[in-house]
Image (cartoon, rainbow, N blue to C red):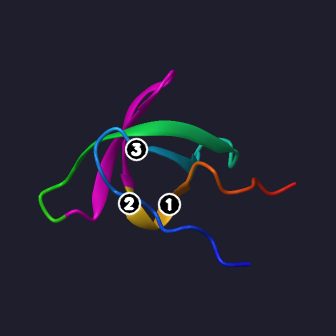
Amino acid sequence: MISPPLELRPGATVQYRAADSGEWREGTLVHGSANDEEWLVKNRFGKFWLHVSRLRPANELQEP
């Protein structure tokens, strides 16, 4: 299955795997780092810098 492209722009909704629990969470991109390798993601738990490899489109199906 081919996943949809990841849209890296402020305001885009993404999913990421939480480091503390391993579960998928949803957040909104705030802005990218100077080299665009990390993005500031905000959600109900706060704001976090995440590497782009840990992000995926929010509309992608979650793993069981």
Q: Is residue 35 toward the left or the right of residue 3 in the image?
A: left
What type is the residue that disc 2 sits on?
A: His
**Magenta residue check for 43:** yes
For image coordinates 62% across by 71% down, the residue present is 3
For image coordinates 57% across by 67% down, the residue present is 4
Q: Which residue is mark 3?
A: 12
Q: Please tell me which of labels 2 and 3 falls first in the chain.
A: 3
What type is the residue that disc 1 sits on?
A: Arg
Whether residue 60 is situated above or below residue 24 in the rendered picture: below
Q: Dot 2: what SS?
A: strand
For image coordinates 57% across by 38% down, the residue present is 26
Disc 2, disc 1: CB below 8 Å?
yes
Q: Which residue is mark 2?
A: 51
Give the residues drawn in magenta, as a range.
Answer: 36-50
Splitting the image into 4 quarters, where does residue 31 fall? top left
**Magenta residue check for 4:** no
What type is the residue that disc 3 sits on?
A: Ala
Q: Is residue 8 toward the left or the right of residue 1 in the image?
A: left
Q: Work out whether residue 53 or residue 59 is closer to the camera in this orientation and state it.
A: 59
